[in-house]
């Protein structure tokens, strides 16, 4: 048998067509069964990760046909990688067990690093402010007076694992103002209270912040 497939987070079976039934065992214990599934019905996806134990695991996939034709369309994936695809059209010559395959998996669970919640709160902006990550603008806002509601931007999803961002404030006419704060998991990591900047048509705030 080939070397076991490594699994860190997800082992999933997706069924699109079953005629007449499938059965999955993991380490000798039944983990999942499904009966007849027509191609006109919604696909069925089942996660099998919870059935695994750390280390070596053995999975057996069995498809069985009763009277009439047999058919199977299914995919087995590990961490998004296709391990095995079955695309067996209806076949009246298959009866009883027509698929009986064994797979070995090396399950080494990995825990994703916790996501830091990064929020920018702008109280006053004159005339524009933006945040860039890897030279891409992930947030921008225009003129914001101090008597208007604050603008609160959750940047967590925009960072996509990055921990460095650039905060820019620009002014076109009159004095430039930028009053804002950046928080990580609720704690303030950076505050700006810039009022009356005379820099025009160029950033008067242009700071790299590591979160």
Image (cartoon, helix red, strand yellow):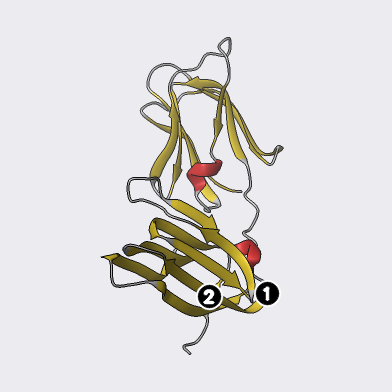
Of labels 1 and 2, earlier in sequence is: 1
Q: Depth check: 200 or 161 in front?
A: 161
Q: Which label was assigned to residue 60?
A: 2
Determine the CA span between mark 1 and mark 2. 18 Å
The part of the image, by quadrant, that contains residue 72 is bottom left
Question: What residue does disc 1 label?
Answer: 54
In terms of secondary structure, where does tag 2 sit?
A: strand
Q: Provide residue 124's location: percent of width, then percent of height.
A: 55, 20
Image vertical order of residue 93 relative to residue 130, above or below = below
Residue 188, image x, y percentages: 69, 37
Q: Position of residue 210 (x, y in %)?
A: 58, 50
Residue found at x 43% / y 16%: 174
- How far from the left and from the top, in percent, is residue 71? 33, 63
Look at the image and tell me whether residue 79 can be seen: no
Residue extending farthest top = 147
Note whether 116 is above or below 193 in the view shown: below
- At x 68%, y 72%, the residue is 53
Name the one closer to the observer, 87 or 53: 87
Q: Residue furthest front?
A: 67
Dot 1 crowding, Cα within 10 Å, few <14, some 14–19, many 20+: few
């Amino acid at each position: 048998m080939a070397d076991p497939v490594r699994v860190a987070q997800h082992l999933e079976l997706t069924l699109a067509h079953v005629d007449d039934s499938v059965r999955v065992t993991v380490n000798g214990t039944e983990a999942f069964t499904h009966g007849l599934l027509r191609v006109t019905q919604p696909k069925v996806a089942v996660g099998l990760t919870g059935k695994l134990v750390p280390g070596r695991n053995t999975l057996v996939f069995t498809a069985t046909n009763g009277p009439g034709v047999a058919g199977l369309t299914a995919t087995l994936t590990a961490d998004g990688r296709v391990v095995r695809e079955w695309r067996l059209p209806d076949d009246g010559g298959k009866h009883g067990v027509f698929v009986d395959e064994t797979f070995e998996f090396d399950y080494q669970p990995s825990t994703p690093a916790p996501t830091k919640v990064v929020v920018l709160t702008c109280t006053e902006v004159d005339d524009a402010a933006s945040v860039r990550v890897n030279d891409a603008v992930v947030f921008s806002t225009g003129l914001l007076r101090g008597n208007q509601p604050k603008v609160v931007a959750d940047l967590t999803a925009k960072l996509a694992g990055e921990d460095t961002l650039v905060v820019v404030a620009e002014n076109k006419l009159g004095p430039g103002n930028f009053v804002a704060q950046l928080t990580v998991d609720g704690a303030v990591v950076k505050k700006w209270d810039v009022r009356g900047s005379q820099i025009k048509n160029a950033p008067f705030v242009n700071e790299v912040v590591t979160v």
